[in-house]
Amino acid sequence: MKTIKAAKSTPVKPVAKKAAKKAAQKATAASGKATGVAKKATATIKKAAASKKAAPAKTVAKKAAPAKTAASKKAAPAKTVAKKVAPAQAAPKKAIVESHAALVRRARRINRELAEVYPYAHPELDFENPFQLVIATVLSAQTTDLRVNQTTPGLFAKYPTPEDLAAANPEEVEEILRPTGFFRAKTKSVIGLSKALAEDFGGEVPGRLEDLVKLPGVGRKTAFVVLGNAFGRPGITVDTHFGRLVRRWQWTDETDPDKVEAAVGALFPKSEWTMLSHHVIFHGRRICHARKPACGACPIAPLCPAYGEGETDPEKARKLLKYEKGGFPGQRLNPPQSYLDAGGIPAPPLGAG
């Protein structure tokens, strides 16, 4: 029995040890795997947690950025306001609300003031008779009166009458008129005008509006210049200066010359129309310029709704004055004596240094 027991028990022990050893190895491996999994899981959790913590930081940063934008948006209006405020200091006065009677009184007072400032006001085109005046006025389109005055002496020396100019060689006339610009169109107009005078009016310039406007190149503005200055018949000359100033003074807001003429004509007696035109045009050329009016040197500033559009400093404004007001030559080579007595200087002839 003992031998049998020993035989049975001897092989059992190594098997158990081997089994235990394998089990232990398996357990260790399993625990290692579990530990690895656990470590990976822990690392993943930590990363997720870190990313979650970081994400709000980014979100906050993104949210913070709009805060700067909001601040800049708040600041932007301040800049805009500053830009708007600056011009407002030099902006013209608001529209005057006045009755028609008050407008008439103010308009007539302005004309009286201008008459005192420009007692020598006159048409700034040189002429000796109605024919020369109508030709010079047609030539004055899109150029200065000075350039016309420097050009017409040569033209009238060669073609003194409508009949002479009607029979002229167009190429020769073009060469004379070249300095005035648009010389081909102007040559066609003055030759056609001269032919009409020679053939239809016996070589004389008609003294009626309805006849004048039928002549080539003659519109209402030209007709009124001729009627008012060659025939003594009242008329309003609506040139660029006249239209600009009457709108600045709020006599009318019309831009069409015929409507401007009607609106302004209703404010004054007909007998004043011609000299009113001279006063306004003189003022527009000397003080109330298109781009930079000399507001600080303007004698009618208290009556002007647009005061402040230009230079208001008196010293700086005086430097903007033109022609006799600034001590410079005028536009006529042969101005009236009253202009010379007031300190006006004749314009130099064409080609003079």
Image: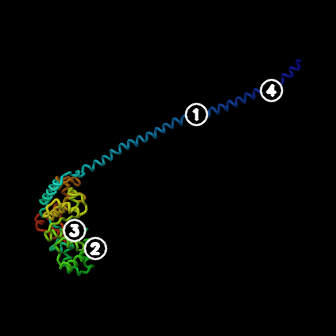
- Residue 201 seen in the figure: yes
Q: Spatial distance from mark 2 to mark 3, Cα to Cα?
A: 19 Å
Please name the amino acid that badge 1 sits on.
Ile
Left or right: 265, with 43 as reference point: left
Q: Tag 3 or tag 1, which sits nearer the N-term? A: 1
Tell me the residue that label 4 is attached to.
15
Q: How many residues crowd around disc 1 within 10 Å: few (fewer than 14), some, or many (20 or more)?
A: few
In the image, taking residue 111 as reference, residue 55 lies left or right, namely: right
Q: From where the camera sits, is residue 326 visible?
A: no
Measure how far apart labels 2 and 4 are at the Cα level.
130 Å
Element under disc 1: helix
Q: Residues within 10 Å of mark 3 (few under 14, many from 20)?
A: some
Q: Can you tell which of label 1 and label 2 is closer to the viewer?
A: 2
Q: Nearer the viewer, mark 3 or mark 4?
A: 3
Q: Which residue is mark 2?
A: 185
Residue 119 lies in what quarter of the image? bottom left
CB under 8 Å between discs 1 and 4:
no
Question: Neighbour class for label 2 at 10 Å: few (<14), some, many (≥20)?
Answer: few
Q: Label 3: which residue?
A: 220
Q: Which residue is mark 1?
A: 45
Q: Of marks 1 and 4, which one's residue comes earlier in the chain?
A: 4
Q: Secondary structure at mark 4?
A: helix
The residue that appears at 18% across and 78% down in the rendered structure is: 201
Q: Give the SS element for disc 3.
A: helix
Which amino acid type corresponds to the residue marked 3 in the rendered image?
Answer: Arg
Q: Is residue 263 above or below residue 18?
A: below
The answer to which of marks 3 and 4 sits earlier in the sequence is: 4
Q: Are marks 2 and 4 in contact (CB under 8 Å)?
A: no
Please name whichever residue, 346 or 223, is drawn nearer the observer in this view of the structure.
223
- Expressed as whole percent of the image width and height from the top left, the position of residue 23 reads 74, 28
CA separation, marks 1 and 2? 92 Å
